[in-house]
């Protein structure tokens, strides 16, 4: 008889990965350049990534075992080194930003870039900027953005911190009147920042409350880093799931802290020396900073999802389990439809978000130009769009990272799998920069407003051509000749059907919502917001499908088109309750005995078939993201596929394994065993 | 003018909690006794909880800041103390089990109880039990259950570890032939256990492979705790999301380790001295242990969900945000329907799972008696039921904990909120004790088997009365006179409609699945498994509603009935895709311009209305779970409602806050600032 063991799964790992890579039909390099917005961008990224990963300071092998305090201290060392490297390599601001995103360790300096700097740049007076601009840009001072309070988050209008104007001295007095007015959750405030932009209610002489405005306040001494008098500042402690350990989210209380009048961010609103209010040209002008952050969240979500799914796809390629396949071995788990229909759509969402975010950032740059010249005409639309997209990408991204982690079974729950860390750092995205449920409400209100002006306004004269991209779906309610698509087996081969279905769903849901506004059900807001956003995204994906041939060669374009189509089909699948409710999928009538057929079956089969077609491309499509092993920091997602060996190696570094007998033995285990033996002897 | 600040949210917290508690219309004590299976059980629990919480060793205030190694060592101290207390207070085995569940720190001793001990008790020979039984019961030895390997999880049939019988010496040789055969993820193996039950392929003389069997193997020396020769053992490192830090999940490799023949767990299968196989009476007899674990998971999920939702409900009661209510203050967030329709259904799931798990454990005790006398007639049904329920409760529980955490907005992401820790510890439940997707497959196969024997078997002679509870829904396919319920506004007032709908959904989905078995879509398995399980649970909930009046007084029974009804309605809501697909909800035909109405609207309104009715009871219903502040360990979920003060107090203990200027200043922040100032000066 043959020896009981003739096949070694650990050795098979690398073979399977090699074979999968060889089977990819596309040029990974071409697709990579496409994703990275051109070969030049990609080469720049690769170069920076190599500089960072070869620097011993950026080694990640110990961080899994460190305390949060150690991780914070390490993070500061990384930040300092980053700007050292910036000087050495003469990186531009854009290149340093790229380096920061490659490092991906939640560094507090990332906070300065994302919130403090843009807010200041958009809203500070030219005088304030000329005084601090260079210092801020060069990190001569470190800032943070103090908005949220212990007692108030998304509802900025009810913040309690006050900034009372004192005309006698031309000063503002920043004050925290209650415990709940303590600024809270402020990134980089806890132990790092020297300055901050404080969101506070402007109180004019006589006590008139003008609502939230922004004030530039020094927090720590520039010579000693000690907290300045009148401020009580600290770190708010560890985050759930051990997320974001490197960032010192902090709290701050102000006890009548005086700042000069010039420190108000007064580009749009201000106070005269006498204490009279200078009205801003647009009430929502100060939302500019938040819009910038949100538009970056779309691309960011794309890359992050891409990271998680790269790990999961690689592991699913080398993990074999269950049925015996044609090669006489257990099947690679990625070949199971129940698994690949979960993972391959995640690739499609990463591809769509990367491209979509890029378009959005272009839109923001236009908006920023408009805003700085006082033109607010695009603000409302941009606001709605970014709100809806922020909800969509954060909800989807959180879910996709968890799906990717869970697809790896038991080993996905190891810290060394790496995807859990991505999830822990990303999950607050559902809450920060606008709580998702609150944002949904804003999208709903904007959608109803468009509906009323376009459709319900007596005799509608609006033409489809005049509709903005965010309300283009409303054309379906304008023209009686437009009908929902008829569904047949061929419906799922081309993008037009899912796009039109998703637009119809948005139109009918908004219509329904307008009819029932007096008694909305509790989930109407979420459904409408999602429908409107997905209709917008679907149309954009349609444009991407049309445009991809301009950038990629036919073979690669064909594969990426399928990836985009998959995005559309899985979006339709997730919208089935709405589509079925509004009769957009025809339910087959039942007899008894029932001979019903499931009307959703053809869609589901089409998704499975498309995933099957993309299966041989999965390794190539994820390789195209271009994440190095150092970036992924995942034993299960190593490039060469040797997941079991990588996991074995990692495990040896666990602190508990550095002594054969644990310290707990003498203290606790031995007494437990001795008592047990004594008791057993009595039985 | 009024001063800008006249109201202090921190002071309001306690007022709001007091008011909410006063508004509860039920006797919390009555409902608590109901949940805890009687006043005597509750008092016992309360007494043990007080003993534990007043013991300084069980203090939790430092654990949030500890390393994993420190948490492991602390966990061992807790375990030792637990058994010391057992001796002091003369606790029964059941009482110690209760204490362990109250401690809720993922102690490795919990692993012994859950896996090692039951497996040994069910499957060891009387001789082996007489030798080790007393030692095991008294913790004179500490065991673990070694099943999963680096290369194989759920697919037990392909485990690589071998146990080769050597007739010459009457020994088995336990061996790990490859890296991937390393035992992995084994709870309490890493640094604690002295013995283990090893799952290994039994190889008979001549090389015949008899598949997996169980063997009792000593791992560490009882005098020194050193690992015995031939074993390589260690901890597998930290878990994702910092979950389960106290448990030393471990790995083990065996290099031809010899054990005596008596150490095979041979109650049902064995080997003669000469090396011939003794066939077990039932191939699946050895699944008994896993069934026991799974039945415990239902009740466990109920209590855990209850814990998470207690925190969220309390915080939502004292947190005020957004619109101004009739009291002139911002509304308590729990009054927003978009929030309370997320939270109150979680209460309903906790109530249902606690009661359902209790019924299931009773069923298991019967099964265990049957099995030990060789009767396996109930095994298949129990197996299907526990598989489906394990998937249902783990999927639901994970989701509910995350919903509860996220409902608390930003503060929900603080480690001090406590719910993140519950989530991190619970999320692997989707994978352990049977990966959910794999279990779904087992449920599907069992359901199709029942369908074929009951319905499709030519002329069906089966009567509804003869159907088992798990396939009772199939009666709907037997009798042509049975029709789906007609839906109207009154449909959602009584349990019969949702139960019948869910049974119809199961029947039609299984029917559809049987028709399309040759070309199943990729999600059919999950849909069928869920439908069949939810039909079973719905019928049980119907029984609970009928029975609750026997235990509770009318007022309390009325409230608990509403809680149960809410469970049914939200289950229907989550099943809408299936119900709509199969025409069980009638979609209204569209015209143009569309005047469609959403057929799901009445259900959604009914859910919102029921949540509204239960809103004043939410604090009472969660107080009734009986969790003390020490048990919850949550700043946001404190009993008296003073969430902001509790959070403030917690934050002061953060290690980063123990020095005013961080150690990172001299090393990293100062150089960064100095460089920045130098560069700024050049600009």
Image (tube, coloured by chain):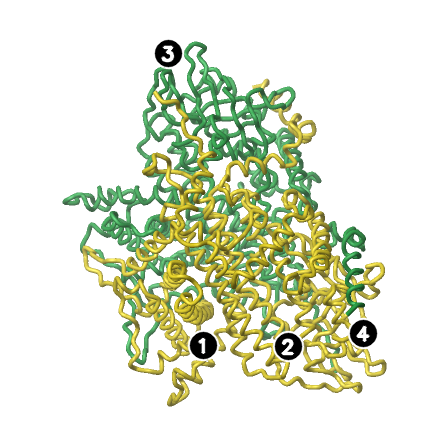
Chain colours: A green, B yellow
For the C terminus of chain A, which image quadrant? bottom right
- How dense is the environment of label 2, judged by Cα within 10 Å: few (below 14), some, or many (20 and up)? many
Q: Point out which mark residue B469 bears.
A: 1
> Does residue A521 appear to the left or right of A216 in the view shown?
left
The picture places residue B337, in percent across and down from the top left corner, at 36, 48
Residue located 74% across and 49% down the image: A655
Q: Are marks 2 and 4 in contact (CB under 8 Å)?
A: no
Same chain, labels 1 and 4: yes
Q: Point out which mark residue B259 bears.
A: 4
Above/below status of B98 relative to A134: below
The picture places residue B650, in percent across and down from the top left corner, at 59, 38
Same chain, labels 2 and 1: yes
Residue located 63% across and 32% down the image: B657
Q: Are marks 4 and 3 in contact (CB under 8 Å)?
A: no
**Residue receiving disc 2:** B286
- How dense is the environment of label 1, judged by Cα within 10 Å: few (below 14), some, or many (20 and up)? some
């Amino acid at each position: 008889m043959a020896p009981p063991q003739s096949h070694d799964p650990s050795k098979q790992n690398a073979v399977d990965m090699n074979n999968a890579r060889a089977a990819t039909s596309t040029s990974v390099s071409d697709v990579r350049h496409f994703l990275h917005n051109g070969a030049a961008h990609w080469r720049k990224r690769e170069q920076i990534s190599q500089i960072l990963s070869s620097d011993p300071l950026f080694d990640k092998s110990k961080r899994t075992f460190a305390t949060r305090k150690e991780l914070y201290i390490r993070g500061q060392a990384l930040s300092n080194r980053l700007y050292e490297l910036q000087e050495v390599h003469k990186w531009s601001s854009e290149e340093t930003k790229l380096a920061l995103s490659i490092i991906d360790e939640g560094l507090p300096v990332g906070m300065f870039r994302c919130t403090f700097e843009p807010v200041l740049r958009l809203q500070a007076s030219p005088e304030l900027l000329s005084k601090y601009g260079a210092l801020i840009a060069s990190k001569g001072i470190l800032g943070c953005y103090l908005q949220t309070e212990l007692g108030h988050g998304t509802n900025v209008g009810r913040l309690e911190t006050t900034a009372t104007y004192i005309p006698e001295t031309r000063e503002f007095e920043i004050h925290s009147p209650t415990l709940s007015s303590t600024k809270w959750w402020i990134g980089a405030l806890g132990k790092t920042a020297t300055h901050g932009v404080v969101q506070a209610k402007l109180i004019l002489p006589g006590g008139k409350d003008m609502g939230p405005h922004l004030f530039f306040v020094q927090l720590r001494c520039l010579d000693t880093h000690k907290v300045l008098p009148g401020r009580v500042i600290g770190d708010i402690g560890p985050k759930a799931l051990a997320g974001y350990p490197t960032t010192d989210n902090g709290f701050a209380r102000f006890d009548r802290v005086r700042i000069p009048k010039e420190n108000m961010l007064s580009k749009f609103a201000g106070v005269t020396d006498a204490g009279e209010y200078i009205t801003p040209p647009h009430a929502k002008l100060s939302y500019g900073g938040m819009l910038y952050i949100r538009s970056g969240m779309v691309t960011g979500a794309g890359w992050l999802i891409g990271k998680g799914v790269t790990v999961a796809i690689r592991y699913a390629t080398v993990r074999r389990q269950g049925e015996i396949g044609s090669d006489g071995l257990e099947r690679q788990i990625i070949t199971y439809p129940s698994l690949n229909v979960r993972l391959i759509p995640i690739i499609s969402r990463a591809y769509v978000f990367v491209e979509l975010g890029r378009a959005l950032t272009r839109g923001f740059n236009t908006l920023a130009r408009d805003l700085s010249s006082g033109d607010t005409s695009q603000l409302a639309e941009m606001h709605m769009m970014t709100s809806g997209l922020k909800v969509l990408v954060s909800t989807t991204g959180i879910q996709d990272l968890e799906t990717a982690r869970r697809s790896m079974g038991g080993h996905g729950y190891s810290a060394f799998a790496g995807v859990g860390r991505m999830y822990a750092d990303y999950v607050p995205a559902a809450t920060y920069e606008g709580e998702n449920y609150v944002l949904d409400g804003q999208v709903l209100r904007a959608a109803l407003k468009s509906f009323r002006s376009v459709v319900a306004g007596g005799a509608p004269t609006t033409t489809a051509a005049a509709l903005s991209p965010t309300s283009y779906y409303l054309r379906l309610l304008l023209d009686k000749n437009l009908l929902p698509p008829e569904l047949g087996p061929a419906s799922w081969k081309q993008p037009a059907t899912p796009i039109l279905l998703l637009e119809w769903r948005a139109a009918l849901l908004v219509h329904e919502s307008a009819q029932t506004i007096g008694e909305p059900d509790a989930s109407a807001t979420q459904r409408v917001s999602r429908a409107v956003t997905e209709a917008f995204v679907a149309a954009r994906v349609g444009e991407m499908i049309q445009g991809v041939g301009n950038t990629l060669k036919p073979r690669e374009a064909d594969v990426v088109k399928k990836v985009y189509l998959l995005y559309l089909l899985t979006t339709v699948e997730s919208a089935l309750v709405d589509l079925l409710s509004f009769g957009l999928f025809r339910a087959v009538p039942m007899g008894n005995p029932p001979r019903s057929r499931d009307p959703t079956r053809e869609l589901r089969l089409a998704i499975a078939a498309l995933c099957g077609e993309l299966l041989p491309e999965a390794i190539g499509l994820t390789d195209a993201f271009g994440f190095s092993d150092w970036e992924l920091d995942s034993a299960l997602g190593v490039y060469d596929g040797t997941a079991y060996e990588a996991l074995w190696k990692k495990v040896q570094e666990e602190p508990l394994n550095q002594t054969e007998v644990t310290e707990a033995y003498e203290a606790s285990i031995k007494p437990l065993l001795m008592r047990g033996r004594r008791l057993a002897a009595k039985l």
